[in-house]
């Protein structure tokens, strides 16, 4: 079970904006995609959340764009859990270009765990907490990416 989950991305024409680089909205979509994939890899696919009648909603996104990415480039999206509170969790992300080892963007989403029927925040089940290892040291993330 990966404590830091990664996914390779090849920049396609639909990722590019009028300025010729990756549109900032694509990063938000990739953040959601990689978070969902990480959760599934840890034994929490969407079907399990539905069965539990609880799931995650976004309270906030913070993204710092550092460098642009362009059509045809290969990048890596990494995500990890930075902590847990009784009803929420910050998840961090790093977008990185392996060809030159440049960080493209750093991001964080505050996810809130809610009852799917009421939409109200609810306590995270212990089985969910234990499925993810908290990563507090971002140096571990860079070490993993640089191999």
Image (tube, rainbow, N blue to C red):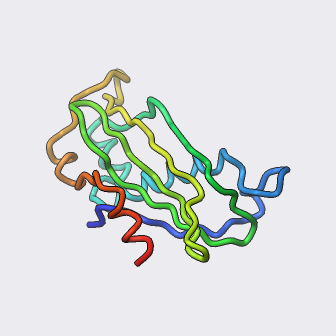
| Residue at figure coordinates x 35%, y 32% from the top left | 112
Taking 13 as reference, is 39 above or below it?
A: above
| Residue at figure coordinates x 30%, y 48% from the top left | 48
Query: In the rendering, at what x and y percent does residue 101 appear?
Result: 55, 71
Q: How many marks?
A: 0
Q: Is residue 117 left or right of residue 146?
A: left
Question: Please, which residue is most extreme toward the right here?
Answer: 18
Q: Is residue 124 left or right of residue 41?
A: left
Taking 139 as reference, is 32 above or below it?
A: above
Rendered image quadrant of residue 69: bottom right
Query: In the rendering, at what x and y percent does residue 62 appear?
Result: 51, 38
Give the quarter of the figure containing the N terminus: bottom left
Query: In the rendering, at what x and y percent does residue 22 appear?
Result: 71, 55
| Residue at figure coordinates x 31%, y 38% from the top left | 89
Q: Is residue 90 left or right of residue 85?
A: right
Of 4 and 39, the residue lying toward us: 4
Of 57 and 81, the residue lying toward us: 81
| Residue at figure coordinates x 40%, y 78% from the top left | 147
Query: In the rendering, at what x and y percent does residue 39 appear?
Result: 35, 54
């Amino acid at each position: 079970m990966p404590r830091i989950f990664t996914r390779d991305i090849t920049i396609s024409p639909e990722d590019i904006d009028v300025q010729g680089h990756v549109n900032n909205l694509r990063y938000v979509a990739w953040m959601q995609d990689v978070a969902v994939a990480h959760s599934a890899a840890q034994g929490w696919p969407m079907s399990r959340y539905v069965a539990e009648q609880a799931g995650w909603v976004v309270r906030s996104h913070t993204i710092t764009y550092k460098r642009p990415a362009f059509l045809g480039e290969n990048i890596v999206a990494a995500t990890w859990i930075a902590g847990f509170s009784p009803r929420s969790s910050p998840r961090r992300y790093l977008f990185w270009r392996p060809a030159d080892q440049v960080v493209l963007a750093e991001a964080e989403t505050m996810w809130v765990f809610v009852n799917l029927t009421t939409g109200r925040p609810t306590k995270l089940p212990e089985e969910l907490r234990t499925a993810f290892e908290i990563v507090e040291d971002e140096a571990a993330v860079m070490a993993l990416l640089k191999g």
